[in-house]
Image (cartoon, coloured by chain):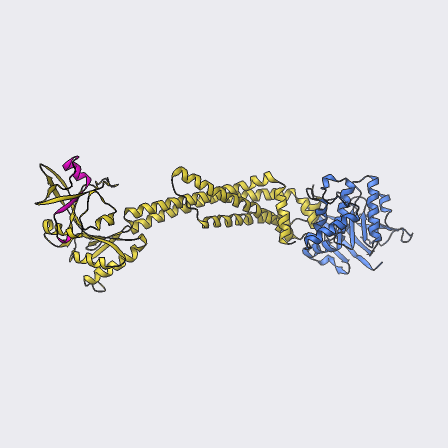
Chain colours: A yellow, B blue
Amino acid sequence: MNFLAALRVSSRAIRSNKVRSILTTLGIIIGVAAVISLVSLTQGANRMIEEQLTSLGGKSLFISPGKRGVGVQENAISLTADDADAIRELDIVQYVSPMIDAPEQVVWGNRNWFTVVVGTSPDFVFINDWYPDAGVFFNNKDVEKNENVCVLGRSVVSNLFGYRDPVGLTVRIGKDSFRVIGVMSSLGQTSGGRDQDDVALIPYTTFQKRILGTDALESISAAVSSPDDIPAAESRIRLVLREKNKLGKNEDDNFYIKSQMGVIDRIFAISNIMTVLLGSIASISLVVGGIGIMNIMLVSVGERTREIGIRMAVGAKGKDIMMQFLIEAVLLSLTGGVIGIAAGVLGSKIGSSFTGWKSVISPESILVSFCFAALIGIFFGIYPARKASKLDPIEALRYE
Amino acid sequence: MGGNVIVTKDLHKVYKLGDTEVHALRGVSIDIKEGEFVSIMGSSGSGKSTFMNIIGCLDKPTSGNYYLDGSKVSEMEKDELADIRNRKIGFVFQSFNLLARTTAAENVELPMIYNNTPSRTRAERAFEALSRVGLRGREKHFPSQLSGGQQQRVAIARAIVNDPSIILADEPTGNLDTAMSGEIMEIFRSLNEQGKTIIIITHEHDIAENAERIVIFKDGSIIEEKSKNGRGAGAARTVPT
């Protein structure tokens, strides 16, 4: 028997028992729909996590002096503006800002407030994606001329000035007077409860001269244009710094570079585990659907024993009967697969409109579930089909 | 009339029912010539159906040889037997055995599906076969829309559509009234006149009388053979068990 004839015979058998066929495929429909919608929703959630992590510093690197994880350090170097300049030379690095900070008293009139003074450069705003919402941030010229200008965080402003606009006023930080040229937008608290707005930003050169008295830096922050560049940037910066510090081949780094990469990788690993987990839970229902198909095929073989006998009497070989029932099982599961894909796409759209999550329907997940449905049909169809093909024609013809 | 189309030599068939062995055939030897019309009679349990199943390549003998058209069928594999059934044998059953929910024409096409006849040729030959049994115009009817006699004629059309040399009919008129039986036997006679070898199992004497040769089974053996032209009456070729 050729394939086309077998296909026609099988599809007729399915159509002649419509209600039963639909009920049988329901298991596969639900299974495929569950796999597609769950996977697309978790992938959408991944996409959102990725975007949020990127805005939370996924593109930035922090370079600190000393060995990683060692408390008291011998021969600890101090980073300098020179190092920052060398890092800025790298093409892969987009922004660089030297960082120094110290707790200091900020005084205006008869009010004073204890805050963290941070010395940095204009790139600070781009690296942290944090901008002033009143006045301006200091520019490179202010850094060059180590001007006494400052940009205040919202908490400092509210504690010193109340509702007054501080831009243009002069405050005292430590022993020196600083002109307030801008106020940063409000960031609120970190998840750890630290007030991010409790800060006063000044040019790092001014910090070194007025507060520190040396040209050392505490750390350097840098940013690249995409999280994918982080590993390359990390190794380039390492090379540059090792060279500048004249480290021999066997010497350990005397600085360390920290990025969010490890954390981000771990979060993605976790969310991938979630995708696989949900996907496999959903595939259990596919297997259950497959068992449903096997069950109905066994019933069908039983009911059609006489038909099988007639077919064998007029010349059907075992493999013809086998093919007929196998095609029937695969047709059932594939029909379920196609309807399930449609239902899954629809379901994930509805799900994403309810949760506000994105849904990412990848062609892979559609292809995989389609093939999986076909495999289910073959796997669970083989046993009933073999059973049919092994029937004895005489017994089958005598069957009532 | 040509040579022998069916030759059996000392056919035995033993079924095992639990611990007991049932001897369905106890040494049956018979030659049937091409173009012969043979009736097989016997009470139930006489072994005639077992004999028919072996002749029809649905079953294999426990021992003994069966030659069909010169080839030794008794030693063939399942798939080869299916092929023989498809090309050389046409079956007609007491209960018609048509596929329900399948039109007359499609029922007749069934044997041709299993030898890869192109679908256009299938339709043409099914139409032709249905015309030969007088069912032109009923091609699109389902078995449930046809009378018993008409259903049996569809079954005969199905049996002849691959142009087999032998037609085996197991009680073909058992479910039909006398008038319809007459029509069916008329078709068998005309097929026989066209050269087909026809073997009919029956227990009705007037049906058996249509044949030129009547073979009678009892207890797994042939106990009697009668010929229309008077020869060969009496006990013939009974093999002692």
Q: Residue furthest bottom?
A: A249
Start-end of magenta stretch = A143-166
Q: Nearer the viewer, residue B158 or B229?
A: B158
Q: Pinpoint residue A78: horizontal percent, then vertical percent.
A: 16, 56
- In terms of image quadrants, where is residue B178? top right
Answer left or right for A188 relative to B171: left
Q: Residue furthest left?
A: A175
Q: Nearer the viewer, residue A399 or A42?
A: A42
Q: Nearer the viewer, residue B76 or A228?
A: A228
Q: Residue at x 78, y 55 (%)?
A: B165
Q: Residue furthest right?
A: B230
Quadrant for the C terminus of chain A, please. top right
Q: Nearer the viewer, residue A137 or A392?
A: A137
In the rendered image, is residue B19 in sight? no
Q: Residue at x 46, y 48 (%)?
A: A365
Q: Pinpoint residue B199: horizontal percent, then vertical percent.
A: 81, 50
Q: Residue at x 84, y 43 (%)?
A: B182
Answer left or right for B109 relative to A152: right
Asked if residue A159 is among those painted magenta in the image, a careful observer would answer: yes
- In terms of image quadrants, where is residue A25? top right
Vertical placement of residue A386 versus A21, above or below: below
In the rendered image, is residue A12 in sight? yes
Q: Pinpoint residue B224: horizontal percent, then vertical percent.
A: 86, 50
